[in-house]
Image (cartoon, coloured by chain):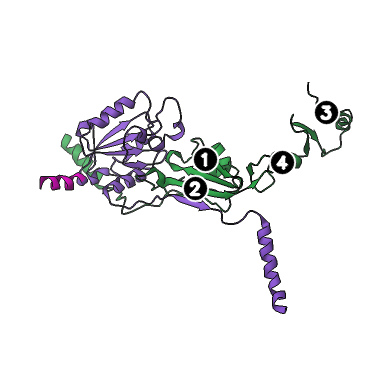
Chain colours: A green, B purple
Amino acid sequence: MWLTSKIKQLLMVMKPGVVTLDYPNERPPVPANLRGQPVFDHQKCIGCGGCSDHCPSRCILVRDVCQELRVMLYDGSRCTYCGRCADICPEQAITMSNSFEIACDDKDDITTRMELFMMSCQRCGRCYEMEKTNAIDRINLKGFRYDNLEQRALIRKTSETFSTELLKESDNYQRPSKK
Amino acid sequence: MLKNLCKRMFKKSIWVYHCNTGACNGCDIEILNILTPFYDVERFGIKLVASPRHADAMLISGAVTRPTLPLVKRAYEAIPNPKLVFAIGSCATGGGAWFDTYNVTGGVDKVLGVNYYIPGCPPRPEAILYGVALALGLVDKQAAPVELKQMEFPIDMYERNEAWEKRNVIYELLK
């Protein structure tokens, strides 16, 4: 009985033959949706730091070296290859490549360092990206303006449709007072 | 002569002790994957053994948590010399998303000397095989540190001046 079953097993195994992948010599194509090492494009990067904000393992570090130079350091040793940085990047400067063969004997081999030129704020000296994406300009684009910067008080500049209520509100609008 | 023989045979038959130091089982499943017939790691002579005293190498997965730290050290000391340590997965290489958590030492390299890092979360079976082949000297290392620099000035005045000079060349010639 056991002999027949063994013969059956033998026949079952002979049908597919050798299935072992001879890996370092033959490398099959990687799946299309593979997330490998993130690749940074320093020409597109505006240095907004969104990737470092959204990185779950905090492996993209933003350092302002001086007033107009921002260094972004990607530390691949603790990267989890989740692809959130590539999703969040407004300029599509980060792409998840399909390179996964990144075994190394030194942790510094999987790091990327980017040096970016930045504009610096006239008021505080911090770097900000070259488009109009500081808070004041963004608020302006949305149709608000700061009435009081310290208290973050906003007032509407315009409304899409004319409403008498808004007009009444703006007529007897009182500036926020320090109490 | 015996020493030379041992040196040559060490490459051909590495016995491996697999040590989970608080991993989520993702890397462990991938380590079991490379033992399956498809990614047959035994063709390199690598065998999984149950005791560190039988082993030549140690596969560590997971960021080393506080309760497992003394045990990892003891297991490492139990392996006879010469020994290799493979850190498999992002948690073992740098601590992963938990590198600064209170209960985690943040990477194996803070506890004991690591010879080879295999990053990934979890690393593909091919990536682990690649690391093993790197240790055996079958493939070359592909990873290298990258440095990128923006070489253009952010101010367009520079470009404007350059354009003006280019336009001005004609007038220079006419003089």
Q: Earlier in the sequence, mark 1 or mark 2?
A: 1
Label placed on residue A175? 3
Residue, disc 4: A138
The disc labelled 2 sits on which kind of residue?
Answer: Arg
Q: Main secondary structure of the magenta part?
A: helix
Which mark is in front, 2 or 4? Answer: 2
Residue type pointed to by label 3:
Arg
- Vertical comparison of B19 with A36: above or below: above
Residue A75 in view here: yes
Label 1 to label 2, Cα distance in Å? 9 Å
Q: Amino acid at mark 4?
A: Arg
Q: Is residue A117 left or right of residue A97?
A: right
Q: Position of residue A84 (x, y in %)?
A: 53, 40
Alpha carbons under labels 3 and 1: distance apart: 41 Å
Q: Are marks 1 and 4 on the same chain?
A: yes
Please state the chain letter of the residue tagged with numbered disc 3 in the rendered image. A
- Nearer-the-camera pick, A51 or A146: A146
Q: Is there CB contact under 8 Å for labels 4 and 3?
A: no
The Cα–Cα distance between marks 2 and 3, rounded to whole angstroms, is: 47 Å
Q: Earlier in the sequence, mark 1 or mark 4?
A: 1
Subunit that carries the residue with mark 1: A
What residue type is disc 1 on?
Answer: Leu
Mark 1 lies on residue: A61
Q: Which mark is residue A113?
A: 2
* Badge 3 and badge 1 in a common chain: yes
- Foreground pick, B120 / A2: B120
Task: Measure the C-alpha gap from mark 2 to mark 4.
Answer: 29 Å
**Mark 4 vs mark 3: in front:** 3
Residue B4 is inside the magenta segment = yes
Between the residue at mark 4 and the residue at mark 3, the CA separation in whole angstroms equals: 22 Å
Furthest residue in direction bottom, as rendered = B174
Q: Which residues are magenta?
A: B1-10
